[in-house]
Amino acid sequence: MHRLLLLTLLASLAACASKLPDPDPRMAWIDIAPDPSDTLMAHRLDGRRWDDGRYFQVMPGRHELELRYQFEVGGGGGGGLGMNTEPTRITCYMELRYDGFEAGKRYRVEARNAANQPMAWLYDQQRQVLARHQVLPRCGPF
């Protein structure tokens, strides 16, 4: 488990260290914007693994964006024997579907945890909500 966490952290740092590519004007650009205390990464585009977790770049039209979102939930409290008092890191895979991506436009995905429930939205440049997430069946402390 610790090895997986370390590999994920190293991959994230490597991605952050490299410069983002210039947006292709023939495609739509989707920025990934996590809450500062959480981790949100681009994971799959139309069912295929996406290599850079910081953004998506897509042809115009309909696409399915899968996101990997991690956040902490508080411990069990109580401090008694067998009670977990440490926060737990939850990983969820969320999907956003949108039919109207346009060439040359920028979009933004934001996510946050509200009462231990993950939520994500796709916004256009005017901050209008274009799509809301669907939590995929994979959500838990892994």
Image (tube, grey):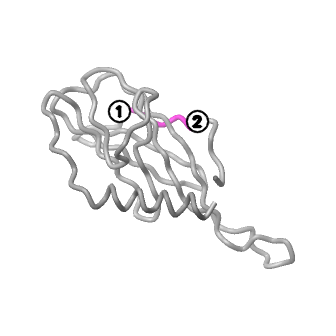
Task: Report which residue position mark 2 lands on.
Answer: 136
On screen, residue 6 versus residue 89, left or right, reads left
Crowding at mark 2 (Cα within 10 Å: few <14, some 14-19, many 20+) = few
Residue 52 picture location, percent across and down: 34, 46
Please indicate whether residue 96 sits to the left or right of residue 114 in the image: left
Q: Position of residue 53 (x, y in %)?
A: 37, 47
Tell me which segment is drawn in magenta.
130-135
128 within the magenta span: no
Percent position (x, y) of residue 128?
30, 38
Check the image and report above or below for 77 versus 26: below
Which numbered disc, 2 or 1, marks the residue that appears first in the sequence?
1
Q: Residue at x 75, y 73 (%)?
A: 77
Amino acid on which disc 1 is placed: Leu
Tell me if 28 is positioned left or right of 16 in this view: left
Kind of element beneath mark 1: strand
Q: Position of residue 87 (x, y in %)?
A: 64, 68
Q: Secondary structure at mark 2?
A: strand
Measured Cα–Cα span from mark 2 to mark 1? 19 Å
Q: Is residue 131 magenta?
A: yes
Q: In which image quadrant can residue 64 be found? A: top left
State whether residue 135 is above or below residue 92. Answer: above
Q: Nearer the viewer, mark 2 or mark 1?
A: 2
Dividing the picture into quarters, in which one does residue 96 lie?
top left
From the image, tell me which residue sits under label 1.
130
